[in-house]
Structure formats: C-alpha cells, structure tokens
Amino acid sequence: MQRTRTSYPSDLSDEEWAILEPLIPAPKPGGRPAKVPRREIVNAILYVLENGIKWRAMPHDLPHWSTVYHYFRKWQKERVWERAAQALVRRDRERERRYASPSALVVDSQSVKTTEKGGPEATTEPRG
C-alpha cells in the first residue's frame, strides 16, 4: 500500500520527474521488487540537499535515511548525477536552440585563479 504524504517544496513535479526518470537507474530485473519508488528516493535526496540537513535528520514521512543515503552514494559512484547533469544541460541548450555541447570555451584571469601570492616569495622559506 502506497502511503501519501504532504509534498515538500523540493519535490519534483510530474514534468520534472518525466525528464529525470529515464536518467535514474531502474531496479535490476529478476530481483526483489523495490520497496521504495525511485521518485521518492530522489525527492528525499533533493530534500537533504536543498535544506542542508544531516541524512539522519530527514523527516519521517520520507524514506528511511539509510536507504536514501545508500542510493545517493551508489548513484554517485556510478556517475549517475554527473550524467544526469550533463543530459539536463544538453536538453536546456537544445531548448534554447543552441548546440547541445558548447563549441568554444573562454578562460580568463577571473575564471582561473592562481595563488594569492605569486612569484618566488610564495615558495621560499622566511629568513630568520
């Protein structure tokens, strides 16, 4: 039985989930059925990230924190978040009628920082 809960501002809308769902790994076929829907796991991850709380401080109406953390780390190791971010950027660029991948990159002195103190003084020992 699926319980209903009050939605949080960080929850995905139906439209957002339709975009993100294909990027989230489905449960493996042949195994036990998933106890927690993928959408609820992603909603719980977004809740933690948006509110800056500890995993153990998640509200009790979300999936158990250890389940959510398990999938967060698993998908992080599998680079799911990186691939999802790249896919969302490509989608956004295409929506703006731009090339999916940038064709140029500009790097200037404001973008690439070096040490606060440069030159030989930064690497020499102080004189006693």
Image: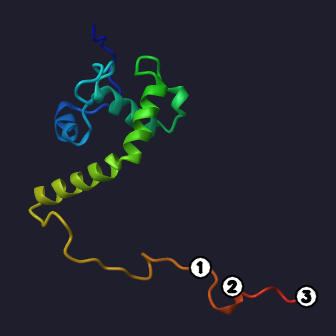
Q: Residue furthest top?
A: 1
Q: State the residue position of label 1.
A: 115
* Neighbourhood count class around disc 1 (C-alpha, 10 Å): few under 14, some 14–19, many 20 upward: few
* Separation (CA) of disc 3 from disc 2: 16 Å
- Foreground pick, 87 / 98: 87
Percent of width and height locating residue 20: 22, 40
Label 3, on which residue?
Answer: 128
Q: Quick check: can you spot residue 52?
A: yes
Please state, as top left, top right, bottom left or bottom right, where the N terminus lies in the image: top left
State the residue in front, 4 or 110. Answer: 4
Residue lying farthest to the right in this orientation:
128
Report the Cα–Cα distance between label 2 and label 1.
Answer: 8 Å
Mark 2 residue crowding within 10 angstroms, few (<14) / some (14–19) / many (20+): few
* SS at mark 2 in the image: helix
Residue ID at (36%, 80%): 107
Identity, as a three-letter code, of the amino acid under mark 3? Gly
- Amino acid type, label 2: Ala
Q: Are marks 3 and 1 in contact (CB under 8 Å)?
A: no
Name the residue that disc number 2 marks.
Answer: 122
Rendered residue at 55%/34% (across/down) = 54
Q: Are marks 2 and 1 in contact (CB under 8 Å)?
A: yes
* Outermost residue to the bottom: 120
Q: How is the image coloured?
A: rainbow
Cα separation, mark 3 vs mark 1, equals 24 Å
Residue at (22, 51) in percent of width and height: 88
Q: Amino acid at mark 1?
A: Thr
Residue 29's spot in the image, x, y percent? Answer: 22, 28
On the image, which quarter does residue 39 sit in?
A: top left
Mark closest to the chain's N terminus, 2 or 1: 1
